[in-house]
Structures are given as C-alpha cells and as structure tokens.
Image (cartoon, grey):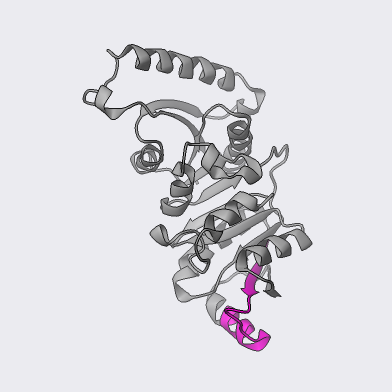
Amino acid sequence: MKKILVPTDFSNEAEHAIKVAAQLSKKHNCELILLHMLDLPLSHISEGVPSDLPEAVYFIKLAHKQFAEVMSKDYLNDITVTEMVDFHDISTGILETCKSHDIDLIVMGSHGSTGLKEMFIGSNAEKIVRTSEKPVLVIKNEHQDFNIEEFVFASDFENDNKETYKQAVKLAEAFNAKIHLLMVNTVANFKTTARAKVKISDFIEGTNFTNYTTNIYNDETVEKGILNFSHIINADLIGISTHGRQGIAHFLNGSLSEDLVNHAKRPVITFKI
C-alpha cells in the first residue's frame, strides 16, 4: 500500500476517516491524499478551468483555508500529505482520482445510521462503495487506536469471491488479525452445516493462511446475520465483496446492500470482485 485517498467535506465524520488514514499511513509508510470536490454546475465551467468564475474562486479559497486547519493537526505529523481541490461530479471525480493517482485504498467517513447518502449529496458515496475498483474502508466513529484483531469476512463463498478473499488475507496479515469466515443461512437460501463447511473449505483451498475460523450463522436476513455475528465476537472490521452495478455483497438483495454499510456501527471494508 503506497497511496491512501480520503475524500473530505471537512465534517467531523470526514475527520474520523482522516485520523484512521493517518494511522494507516504511518504504519505502512505511505502517502495520504486528501480530496475535496467542488460540485459546481459543469455548464459554468469552461474546459475545467473555472478561475474566471467568482463563485469558484470563493469556494477554492474556502477549501484551502479549511485544508490549512486540517494540515495543522498533530495526527498528520511525519506523514506525506497532499491536498487536492477539484471540480467534478463527486463520485465520478473520486473514482477518476483513484485512477490518475494510482490509489491503493479509499478511506471515507459516514454519518452513522443515517447513512452514507448524507456525506456526499444523494447516492454519491453509495456509488463509490459499489463501483470502486479499489478497496473502500468506511469509518463511522473516531478511532484513537485503529487496530484490527478480529476481522469478519462475510461471503456466499462462490468462486468469483476468491480474489477479494486474497485481498482480505493481505489486510489480515498486515494487522496480524484473525479472519472469521462467515456464511449466513436464511430461510430463503438455506444450506446444512455440513454443506456450508464443505463450500467454505473448497473456497479457501490453496490459500496459505491459517489464522481463521469457519462460521455458519442462521438469521432472518444476510444483513442481520452479519451485523449480529460481528456484534457477538466484537469484530473490529467487517469485510464484504462488491459486484459492481449489482451492489455491495452481491449475495444480498435490493437495498440491503446499502443498509449493511449504513447500519453497521463498526468499520466496513469492501473489495471489488
């Protein structure tokens, strides 16, 4: 991991994300990029250079003033930090920044149980979580010491999840964390314990990682199962796979994908299939 991107709207929730990203930057000796997107009407911006637009000039100056306050924080000492202000559709701009700057991880804040939607206007944040090619770490609360010891990896353990599991293993190894492999059984999609264990065993075959547990948990919905199991073991992090336009954790249906990230009180990291 060499570069971490934190989109910020200068809210308290965004600061929680910056603090976690700063800890990760120090641990892995990587660069931290802070990005503020100014979502001005594109019709008012000529060739991407809005310097002659008074409103744009005002918001640019305001953003840099707010960045100056952020950059003065002690938790950013001894870290290479780059601040960026850009004009773009917010979700698209964040994803394009990832590509142009070869970002390895996105860390973003969320407004608690009211959902990711509030932070970046409408469904922009949900789009980022769904469509980002890079892992996205969603932070809900302040973490003075962001450490991962108990890491839940929830999946349906189909073959297309294997690459995301390898990413989860790398993360677990970096933190010396234990992975709790979790399959949630529901009435609508029930598997016997024996069948579920065989499926999980086949899924992880060939992966040289031994610090894990295998868990089959019964609940009303997949979302409730993940949240309840994570609560029981006091997980430090929940990991799930995303499947592009089909939504977070493609084994979920409808709005449950967004609900999982919105309702979890602990950090959630998503990996793109």
- Taking the magenta stretch, the answer to whether it contains residue 9 is no
On the rendered structure, is 157 left or right of 54? right
> At which x and y percent is residue 75?
65, 28
- Taking the magenta stretch, the answer to whether it contains residue 198 is yes
Write down the quadrant of residue 26 in the picture. top right
11 w.r.t. 219: above or below: above
Residue extending furthest toward the left: 47
**Count of number-bearing discs:** 0
The reply to whether residue 48 is visible in this rendering is no
On the rendered structure, is 181 left or right of 272? right
> At which x and y percent is residue 56?
36, 17
Image point (42%, 62%), residue name = 246
52 w.r.t. 238: above or below: above
68 w.r.t. 132: above or below: above
On the rendered structure, is 42 left or right of 183? left
User: Which of the pair 178/183 is nearer the observer?
Assistant: 183
> At which x and y percent is residue 261?
58, 52
User: Which of the pair 167/237 is nearer the observer?
Assistant: 237
> At which x and y percent is residue 83?
46, 26
User: Which of the pair 193/207 is nearer the observer?
Assistant: 193
The reply to whether residue 152 is visible in this rendering is yes
Span shown in magenta: 178-201
Image point (43%, 13%), residue name = 61
Write down the quadrant of residue 150 in the picture. bottom right
164 w.r.t. 106: above or below: below
Q: Quadrant of the C terminus?
A: bottom left
On the rendered structure, is 7 left or right of 70? left
Image point (58%, 22%), residue name = 70
